[in-house]
Amino acid sequence: MTGNSEMQLESESKGIEQELYRFSQTEQLYGYMSFFTDTVLFEYSYPEKRLYLSANAKGNINLQAFQLFFSKHRDNAPKEGEMRSFEFSLGKMGEPFHWCSCKLTAIWEDKKSAPFKLIGKLQDISGLKAREEQLLLKSIKDGLTGVYNKSAFEYRVDELLKDEMESWLCMIDIDNFKEINDCYGHPTGDRILMKVGGMLCDLFPEPDLVGRVGGDEFVVFTSGNNVYKRAEKLLKRAKKAVPDGEGRLSVSIGIVSSAGKKEINYQKLFSQADRAMYYAKQAGKNRIASYHDNIWQVT
């Protein structure tokens, strides 16, 4: 009997040592997480009503913002075997872990009415989001001037026209641009394109839209009633935008109104604005031509 008891005690002792060893290894593994600053582990115990985070959470995430996010899933835990995966913004712009991916699941015991634990991980994907944004901008923006490219501009305008609000489309063409390129070189031409794009963005800030639809052709879409005054400012600014020795800069502008008509679309407006700009060119350039209520006017 004694021998059997000693063997049993020895076996139990080894079992305890093994459990302690496993616990120690687990502690060590969690400690190693501090080396991976882009990943934070978390665990919530329902019986204890306590939330645990890996040590590297401090300084990496906005804990107050995380608690607000976490409370929603704590009270609406995943079902047994369910794994939730999503992306969200955490904290204020400029803080660590602004954008995160999150995976979480719940541990249930004996199919009780409430889970035993909620476990998950956060991963910092701010860099990935920034790269995605850069790729998106490249797909919708003109590489030289930074304004919308032709296809993106058309799509945005057609969407806005669905509101059936009165708005205006302006067609802007740089006068004698070919001669500028031929006489002063393409680098000078590129600088002029960038200046015109910059002036348009300054005179027609968001929510107005500015796009480049051709080599030296720009378009503007606005719902502002002072579109003609801003177009006149563009004519004046263009004259002063180019330094001596780089030619003379002027633009011709065609303006048309959507009049809030339901049947109007971008292609119809563009065709009318293009004709109006042509009239401005024919009238001597460096001026504005408009088409409104079936009346052509050059100023």
Image: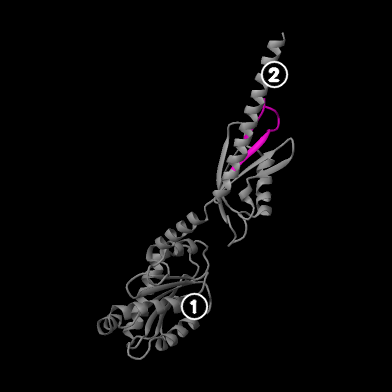
Residue at the (52%, 62%) spot, across then down: 163
Q: Residue 57: x, y in percent?
A: 62, 50
Residue shown at 38% from the left, 66% from the top? 150
Report the mark closest to the observer, 1 or 2. Answer: 2
Which badge, 1 or 2, comes first in the chain's sequence?
A: 2
Report the quarter where the C terminus lies: bottom left
| For residue 86, above or below residue 22 | below
Magenta span covers which residues? 106-120
Residue 255 position, x and y percent, is 43, 77
Give the residue displayed 62% in from the left and 54% down from the top.
61
Image mark count: 2
Of the 4 image quadrants, the one containing the N terminus is: top right
Instruction: Judge from the rendering whether residue 52 lies leftward or rightward of residue 133; answer left or right.
Output: right
Q: Amino acid at mark 2?
A: Leu
Residue 139, percent across and down? 40, 60
Q: Main secondary structure of the magenta part?
A: loop
Disc number for residue 202: 1
Q: Position of residue 178 (x, y in %)?
A: 27, 80
Q: Nearer the viewer, residue 30 or 190?
A: 30
Identity, as a three-letter code, of the amino acid under mark 1: Asp
**The residue positioned farthest toward the right in the image shown:** 48
Q: As rendered, which of 265 and 21 lies closer to the eye?
A: 21
Residue 117 lies within the magenta run: yes
Residue 295 appears in view? no
Q: Residue furthest left?
A: 182
Compared to 64, does 108 lie above or below? above
Q: Is residue 89 left or right of residue 264?
A: right
> What's the mark number on residue 9?
2
Secondary structure, mark 1, is helix
Residue count near mark 1 (Cα–Cα under 10 Å), binned few <14, some 14–19, many ≥20: few
